[in-house]
Amino acid sequence: MRILICAILLAVTSGLLAQESVTPRPEYQTQRIEGEPPTIDGKLDDAAWNQVEWGGDFYQRQPDDSAPVSQETSFKILYDNRYLYVAWRAYDTEAKLIEARLGRRDEFPGDWVEINFDSFNDKRTGFSFSASASGVRGDEFISNDGNNWDSSWNPFWFFKSQIDDEGYTVEARIPFSQLRFGKDEIQEWGLQVNRNLFREQESSSWSPIKQTQPGWVSRFGTLKGLSGIKPRKPLEIQPYVLGQIRTGGGFADADPFDRKTEERLSVGLDGRIGITNDIAVDFTVNPDFGQVEADPGAINLDGFQIFFREQRPFFVENRNIFDYSVTSAEAGGQYNSDLLFYSRRIGGSPSRRVRANNGVGRFVQQPENTTILGAAKVSGKTREGLSLGILSSFTEREFATVIDTTGEFEEEVEPFTSYNVGRVQQDFNKRQSTIGVMVTRVDRNLRTDQLDFLHNQATSSGVDLVHRWKDRAWSLRANMVFSNVSGSQEAITRTQRSFEHLFQRPDADHLGVDTSLTSLSGTGGTVSIGEFDGDWVFQSGFTYRSPGLELNDIGFLTNTDQINYFAWGARRWRNPTKFFNRFQWNQNIYMGWDFAGNSLNRSYNTNFWGQTKGFSNFNYFLNLEQQDISKNALRGGPLLRRSPGYFTGGGFGSDYRKRFNVYLNFGFGGSYDGNVRGANIGLDFNYQPIDALSLYASPSIDWGSRNDQYFDQQSDDGRIGYLHGSIEQQTLSITLRATINLTPDFTIQYYGQPFVARGVYDNFKNVADPLARDFGDRFYTFSNITFDEENNEFLVDDDDDSEVDFEFRNPDFNFLQFRSNLVVRWEYRPSSTIFLVWSQGLVGNADPSKGVLSALSDDLFGNDVRNTFLVKATYRWVR
C-alpha cells in the first residue's frame, strides 16, 4: 500500500509541474442532409454529397512520417436523424495495381480506407470502421488511447466499394445506434481518417501522428457541425438454433460410451439492451461456441499453467473493459501474464476427474467443459470519463456418468458456480490519466464431500493508476491487488501446497503449512515509470506477489512469494534509413528474489528487429541467464539451482506484400556446463494464388535435452527423493489453414493441427545438494537400478541394502493430438450468420521408441477419432 500511495503522490506532483505543448489539429465541418440521403452503391453520384466539401491533405505515417503521401485521399461526411454517411475517394495513378484481395471480416486484406470516431471526445476511446477495395468490412473498438483495438466488436453497418480509373471509391452508412455519445444539442467529436496503400505498405492519416509519438485517439482531429442528433439506446436481439451430431471413435469396442452417437438440438439467445445511450447490457442465454477454433496443442513439463487465449465471442467482445494485468505488458518477459480476470476459467474443464479402469470393467464419460447457463455484461462510458464494466455468469452442476459391475450411476465433478466481475475507471488530468478499481468474486455451491478440495468462495480486488504527462510522453503505472479464498481445511491446505505457493518447502523459514486454516489472503502489486516518446524510450519498475496471493479461481497466477525488478530501454529508427524502413534495438534486465531475501534469478536480453528497404522483416535476440534458482522445480522441495546458460535465435521473412511469402524462425542454446541443450526451427508459408483463396502452413520442430528433468517425488524411511532423469525431447506441430472467400460474406475456412511430443528418459538420479554450483555435486546418479519389463517400471536400491527404495513407472512418453475445424460461414445479412461446422479431435499415444515423424505418419489416425457435425443459424435484429 505504501508503494501505491507514493506513486499517487508522485503522479499528482508531476501532473502539476508538467508543461504540455498542444499541436493544432485539423477540423472537418459536416452538415445535416437536406433531401434524399445517398444510395450506398459506391458511386458517389448522389446530389446529397454536394452539400459538403472534401476533406483531404493526408500525412504519411508509415513508412516515412516526414515524407508526403504517394497517393491522395479525400473524404466527406453527412448525417441525418439515424445515420452517418461517409464517402472516400482513394486516388491511385496506377489503378490497375490496386490490391482487391478478399478475406473474412476484420482481416484487412489489400487496399483499404478507414474512419475513427471519438464520439465522446474523451481522447481515449473510439469506434473504427474499415472498408477494403474488395468489399471486406473491418470494425474495432479502440480503448486506452489506441493501446487496445478490439476486433471482436461487430457493429451493424453497411458499405459498398467500387474500383475505377482514378482509384477506388467507398460509401458507408453507419447507424448512430452503434455509437455512444452525449445529449448536447451541438456536438464535436474526435475524428481520424486513414488509408492503407498495400503495394507500398504506406499508411496515411488525415490528422498527423508521428511514429515515435505515444497515443492515438488523443491525436485525432475534430468533427464539427453535428446538431440535433439524439442518442439512441441500443436494442439488439440475436437468437440462434443449433443441431449437432457427435460420433465416437469406435476403437475401444468394450467401452459403451465410445460407441455412442450423441445428438443435440439447442436454442439460445444473445442480445444487447441499452440502459442509457452510455450504458448497455449484453447478455447470452445457453450460449454455444461450436464454431470457435480449437486450442493449439501444447505440453509442458515444468509444472506451470499453459495460457490459452480467449476465442469465445461473448467473452472476447469488450474484453478490454475487464483487462487488469498485475504487471503492465511493457514489462515483458516472465512477469506480464498474471491477470485479475481470466475468462477461460468460466466454462472450463470440470475440476474433478473420475478415473476409468477398462481392465476391470469401469467406464467413465467425463464432460469436457462446464455448461454456461447464461452470462451478462454491463458496460459503457459517460461523457465525464467514468467507464463501467460488470460481468456475471453462471455455470451448471456437472456429472460424470460411470458404468461398472454395479450398474450405471453419476458422480458430481463440478458444482453450480457463479462468477462476478466489476470494473470502474475514471479519467482525469485532461483525459490523459486514469484511476480504477476492479473486484471479482466466485461462489461455488458445494454439496458433496468429493468436491471439498475446491474453494467455496474466492474474492479479489485491485486498485490501479496510469498517469501520463508531457503530452503523454511520460507514464507512471501503479497497481495493488488483494485476494481472499475460503473453504474447508482440505481446500486451503491444498492451496498452500499447490504449485504456485508451495508453503511446505523445507528451507522456507518464512512459510509453513497450517492445516487448520479455512481462508487464505494475499497481496500483489506493481509500480513502474517510463518515457515513450522520441527515439530513445525506457521503462523501469518493481512487481511483487505475496505468498498468500491466490487468483486462479477466476484469474491467472503463475507464481507467488516473489519480488521482481525489470527495466528495458530501446533506440528506435522509425523512419527509413539508407538500409532499413525501420529498425529498433532493445535491452532488458530482470532480477528476482523471494520474501526471505534469497536471490533467485538474474537475466539479460538484447534484441533487435526491423524491416529492409525491400520490405523483408527480420529479428534477432540473445538471452543470457546468469542465475536461475527455482523454488518450484522440486514441487515443494528446497530451492534448486539450475545451470545458467544462454538462448539465441531470430527470424527472417520475405516481402509479405507478395502473394507467396515465407518466414523462417529459429533458436538454439543451452547451459554453459553442457547439461541443457535445445533448438527449434519453424517456417510460416503464406500463399494467395487468387484474391479469393489463401493458404497457410506452419511446421515447427523443437528438440532438446536436459540432465535435470524432474518427474516424481517419493519418500523412503523418512527421506524424500526428488527423482530426475536425463530427457531427450522432441516436439513437432504443423498448423494448416485454408480460406476460400466466395464473397466477402461467404467463406469456407479450414484449420488443422497435428501435434506430437516425445520424451525419452535415462540416467535417473536424485538431488544431493540442491544449491551446489557444480552439477555433479547437485545430483547423484542411481547406480543400482533395474527395469521390470512386465510392469514397465524401474526399481531403485539407493543404499545397497538389497531393498527397493524407489519404484516408478517408465516416464517415457509419445503424445499425439490432432484437432481440426472446417467452417462454412454465410453472413446472409449484416451480423446474421449461418454456420456449417465439422470438427475432428483425437488424443492418443505412440511407442516412445518411435521418433516424432514416425509417430505422426504411423500412429496419428490409429487412435480414437471423434467427429462433431454442427449447423448453427443466428439472426440479428437491431432497432
Image (cartoon, grey):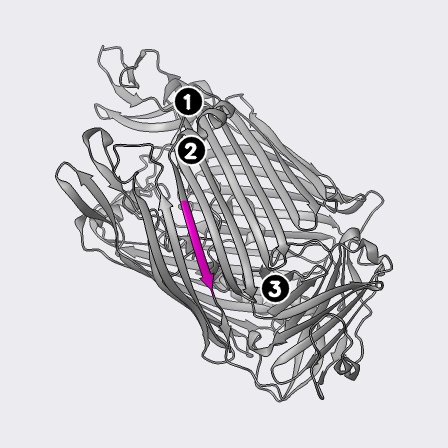
The residue pinned by badge 1 equals: 848
Q: In this view, does 684 lie above or below 225?
A: above
570 and 576: which one is in front? 576
Marked residue nearer the N-terminal end (1 or 2)? 2
Tell me which amino acid carries mark 1: Pro
Q: Of discs 2 and 3, which sits in the foreground?
A: 3
Residue 552: x and y in percent read: 37, 51
- Give neighbour class at mark 3: few <14, some 14-19, many 20+ (Cα, 10 Å): many
Q: Which quadrant of the figure contains the N terminus?
A: bottom left
The residue pinned by badge 2 equals: 301
Could you tell me if the residues under marks 3 and 1 are in contact, i.e. CB atoms within 8 Å?
Answer: no
Tell me which amino acid carries mark 2: Leu
649 and 622: which one is in front? 649
The residue pinned by badge 3 equals: 139
Residue 412: x and y in percent read: 22, 49
Residue 152: x and y in percent read: 54, 60
Extent of the magenta region: 868-874
Q: Is residue 236 above or below residue 493?
A: below
Q: Of discs 1 and 2, which sits in the foreground?
A: 1
Q: What element carries label 1?
A: loop
Distance from the alpha carbon under mark 1 to that under mark 2: 16 Å
